[in-house]
Structures are given as C-alpha cells and as structure tokens.
C-alpha cells in the first residue's frame, strides 16, 4: 500500500528558510544547495540545458525551503563527502526506489535506514559507476546522517540534529532544529535556547561565564553554540 503523503498544511512543510539560511544551518556550500533546489545549467552541443532540481522547495520563487526540505538536503549531503552529486542520477535513483517501495518523498522517510536506502544507493552507484566498496561507504555515510533525524509516529521527520562543522561522523548531537521550537531555528537541545541569541551576546562583548549563568548553561554549551554558528 502506498505510504500516506505528508500533509501540505503541516508547519514542517511550510516555507521557512532562505537558501542562505538553510545552507548555513546544514554547513553546505550555498551553490550546492541552490543546484539541488533550483537546478543547474550545463553546456551541450545544442546549447545550454538545465538539470531539473532534486528537491522541490516549499516556495519556488523566490525559493524558500521548509523544515522537510532541510531534511531532504541533509540526506543528500551524505553523498557529498567523497562523491560529487550528479543531479540527474540522484533524481533517477530516488524515483526508482520510490517506485519500487511505493513511497512518496523517499528522502524524508525512515525507510531509508533499511531497504529504501539500499535500493537508492545501489541504483545511484550504478548510474555513476561507483564500485561495490564505494556504495558501501555511501551507505555508511547515509546511515550516519539518518541517525541525526527523528521521526514521529506517522513516520514524518520532526527534529534534525545538524553536524557542528565538517566532522561528518561525529556522534555528538547538542544542536537541534525543530519546526516547533524557536520558529525552526537551531537551538541547544538541552535547554531550547537559540544558538544565534547566544552568539549575538558573545559578539556584543559579554563574558562566556555570564551568558552561561543567565541561561543555566555550562560554558562549554556557550562554546558549542558559537562553534556551530560560526563554523564554515
């Protein structure tokens, strides 16, 4: 039976993030995220053509992403560690796996941690001619990304724990993005305090221990918020 489509009026499916914000939260190059959402031009013998995007933004023009779009981009990020994402191949692999499993929007589904992920990676690997060992490496990276997503009883994502910086396999998850907390902006998950609010106070010259005391945090929590917000 085909899986139920996510509700269009769900707050997690509403426009909330510019491409710049989303790229910063996910630690992605803005141009990469733009190509996934808007598409990318490429030259041919007949002139310039356009790869269709992989992610359908909640609002096309100007492009605004929803929380669920963030999840889709987070999952696609797993393919960028050692492999350049081929948009046409990714789209084809997603469509193939969705068709085989009877799922809608595969990149949002917890089934990616089982057969869905295996089908997707196998198909993508075949399309870009990646070896069996390369496909295994991609599956491990995909799993590392999926462990940072939490799903509700309806199998829809409700919380993302983004990576702090460039360390892709870190198990630390002190930061959360949740559409129901702080308008979907990153927070320290232990206290629900906006990371940008902490950084603004640091930039204003306040001492780390004073900020920590005001929020009931440890100084290391304040440092974590700064690391996340200021990491390239």
Image: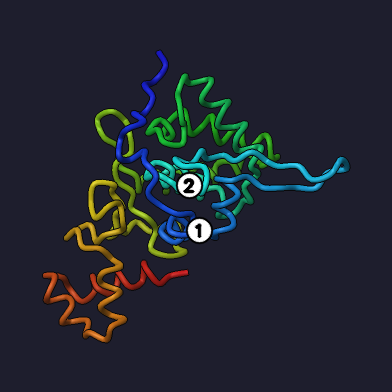
Q: Is residue 218 left or right of residue 183?
A: left
Is residue 99 placed above or below 26 in the rendered structure? above
Position of 98 with respect to 9 (left or right) is right
Contact between marks 1 and 2 (CB within 8 A): the answer is yes
Tell me how the rendering is colored: rainbow
Mark 2, residue position: 73
Residue 112 picture quarter: top left
Q: Eyeballing the image, is 115 above or below 128?
A: above
Residue pictured at 54% horizontal, 33% vertical: 120
Q: Quadrant of residue 25?
A: bottom left
Residue found 24% across the figure and 30% down from its top:
153
Mark 1 surroundings: few (<14), some (14-19) or many (≥20) residues within 10 A:
some
Report how far apart the C-alphas of labels 1 and 2 lie in the structure: 9 Å
Q: Position of residue 230 (x, y in %)?
A: 40, 72
The reply, left or right, for residue 229 in relation to residue 29 is left
Furthest toward the right, the residue is 45
Q: Which sits in the foreground, 13 or 123?
A: 13
Q: Position of residue 65 (x, y in %)?
A: 44, 46
Q: Nearer the viewer, residue 221 or 180?
A: 180
Indicate the secondary structure of the residue bearing disc 1: loop
The residue where tag 1 is placed is 28
Callout 2 environment at 10 Å: few (<14), some (14 to 19), or many (20+)?
Answer: many
């Amino acid at each position: 039976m085909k899986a139920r489509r996510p509700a269009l009026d769900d707050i997690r499916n509403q426009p909330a993030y510019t491409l710049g914000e989303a790229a910063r939260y996910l630690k992605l190059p803005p141009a990469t995220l733009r190509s996934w959402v808007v598409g990318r031009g490429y030259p041919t013998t007949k002139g310039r053509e356009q790869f269709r995007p992989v992610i359908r933004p909640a609002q096309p023009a100007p492009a605004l992403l929803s929380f669920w779009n963030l999840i889709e981009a987070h999952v696609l990020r797993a393919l960028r560690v050692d492999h350049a994402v081929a948009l046409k191949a990714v789209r084809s692999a997603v469509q193939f796996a969705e068709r085989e499993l009877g799922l809608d929007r595969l990149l949002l589904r917890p089934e990616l941690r089982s057969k869905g992920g295996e089908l997707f990676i196998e198909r993508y690997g075949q399309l870009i001619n990646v070896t069996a060992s390369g496909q295994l490496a991609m599956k491990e990276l995909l799993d590392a990304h999926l462990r940072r997503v939490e799903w509700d009883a309806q199998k829809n994502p409700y919380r993302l724990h983004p990576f702090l910086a460039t360390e892709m396999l870190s198990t630390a998850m002190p930061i959360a993005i949740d559409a129901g907390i702080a308008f979907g902006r990153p927070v320290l998950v232990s206290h629900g305090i906006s990371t940008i609010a902490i950084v603004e106070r640091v930039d204003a010259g306040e001492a780390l221990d004073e900020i920590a005391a005001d929020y009931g945090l440890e100084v290391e929590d304040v440092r974590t918020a700064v690391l996340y917000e200021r990491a390239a």
